[in-house]
Amino acid sequence: MRLGRSPRPAGRRHKAQGGAAAPAPGPGTPEVQGEVVRAAFLADGAPAAGRARLLPDVAVKRLPVYLRALGDLRAAGWEIVSSAELAERTGLTSEQIRKDLAALGGFGTRGVGYRLDVLVASIRSVLGLARPVPVALVGAGHLGNALARYNEGRRQEPRIGAIFDADPAKVGEALGGSVIRPMDELGAVVAAQGIRLAIIAVPAAAAQEVADRLARAGCDVLLNFAPVRLSLPPGVRCHNVDLAMELEALAYYARPDVPPPGP
Amino acid sequence: MRLGRSPRPAGRRHKAQGGAAAPAPGPGTPEVQGEVVRAAFLADGAPAAGRARLLPDVAVKRLPVYLRALGDLRAAGWEIVSSAELAERTGLTSEQIRKDLAALGGFGTRGVGYRLDVLVASIRSVLGLARPVPVALVGAGHLGNALARYNEGRRQEPRIGAIFDADPAKVGEALGGSVIRPMDELGAVVAAQGIRLAIIAVPAAAAQEVADRLARAGCDVLLNFAPVRLSLPPGVRCHNVDLAMELEALAYYARPDVPPPGP
DNA sequence: CCCTGTGAACTAATTCACAGCG
DNA sequence: CGCTGTGAATTAGTTCACAGGG
């Protein structure tokens, strides 16, 4: 992971001319809405036998990075951006960005760049964020609180739509726009709202039990913050974020004999 | 990332025989302490010109995973473990584990397996955890609180040794074994304790300023939870964890047309 | 020209397959 | 035998280099 390269390319910046650096949502900005995926990576029945081709995980992880950079640019009044400019702002290389964006369907105009509105709409669409994505949060402790409020101010797309906690004292409290519900309602609420994405922010001892409930309720994409490896039925994905592990790994780079990162 | 494969190998389990599944720290467990690194990957001056060979990032990220599995095994009274057993518990492949462990110096006995105590000591040593690693935490909000208490019960090696917050109302409060200090003390405390590792858990708007201070104070390994890309002087590493991005990426896998994970 | 899109070359990482040793 | 350690083969991912369109 090579952060920080600064090739200093990108001559002229394509900002919206006219007024100051206003958000510029004027009539010059054509509507781009709904599903824009021309993508070839999620073939419907194309490439012969086997499973449909899907975007590699590494690329999926980069899409939100683009989205953030694009958001900043848009807020600053840009309308068009080049892969070089994006590279500078994300720490990735421009070729990589072009590869990714081309894989999403290849919008972008040669000699010019990518239109922000098209790009944002496309990426959001690929990520499935074009329509609301409800998320369940289980555990309203310190971490759960932090998560629920993480993007309190900003627009955040996968929006936390239901919060559960085992502590009866917390049930009923408002948190980040939702109300904390008791655990017994988990199955019903998740099913009713068709929630497939869930965040596990409970103590390690409770995590497996919670995961089981979630899986049974139909959640098949989990984000687990508890420091345990969950065993899950096939077909359920689980992404683990373990703060302690994260720190342990970083400790390596703080060893006195590990050289500083490259240029 | 293929989680969940279960090749179901691993015949006999090498538990300590004798009593029941007791922690078995008896006299049969020889002391393994201090630095055990026979590792070849951090050569002192070996391979000709250029920079010393260091462990690839992907491998560094796996070491804490091993550490956790090993901790579980040890708690259950195991003394020896095979790569196959570890594979089953971590979701990695046994070859990969052997490659990693061999790269750390290749302890482990052919036909038998790896001794838990040796393995744990070695990995900890490679990660630099053999001696205490102090960490600074900046920001005692919801997230900071969660982080400070994350491992309140368990032994955690990179231990949070200093906490800072800009809010005068919080200064003086105890949190996870430390006391929250005012931001002005950051430079002095970090320097005095020789802290190189820091966690940024402040609002996005304050993150860059905090990062600058930390870098100036000598912290060169940062774990940033604020949703901003920080610009840092060369030589400073920064690992970003952005909860919102994490969710955005996961949303992809919850798309109705994305097939479930492989076998 | 400028900047995208893409085959080709390269590099890194994983998996295979088996030699080697308790 | 069983399980580690490791070269060889394979696969995935990145970078290079340039063709191609506005």
Image (cartoon, coloured by chain):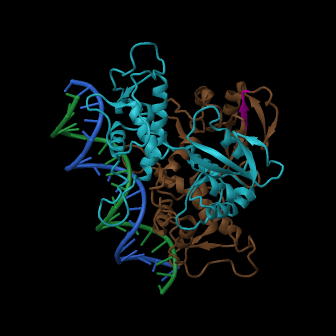
Chain colours: A cyan, B brown, C blue, D green
- Residue B169 percent coordinates (x, y): 80, 28
Bounds of the magenta span?
B162-166
Q: Main secondary structure of the magenta part?
A: strand
| Left/right of residue B54 with respect to residue A50 in the rendered view | right
Q: Is residue B141 magenta?
A: no
Q: Which residue lies most toward the right here?
A: A169
Judge whether residue A36 can be spotted in this image: yes
Q: Does residue A20 lie above or below B220 as drawn?
A: above
Q: Between residue B8 and residue B237, name the one nearer to us.
A: B8
Q: Does residue A24 lie above or below B8 as drawn?
A: above
Q: How many marks?
A: 0
Q: Which residue lies most toward the top here?
A: A19
Judge whether residue B242 can be spotted in this image: no
Q: Is residue B165 magenta?
A: yes
| Left/right of residue B90 with respect to residue B135 in the rendered view | left
- Residue B74 percent coordinates (x, y): 68, 68
- Residue A215 percent coordinates (x, y): 61, 62
Residue at 46% across, 50% down: B54
| Left/right of residue B114 with respect to residue B149 in the rendered view | left
Residue at 66% across, 43% down: A147
Residue at 39% across, 55% down: A54
Q: Quadrant of residue A229?
A: bottom right
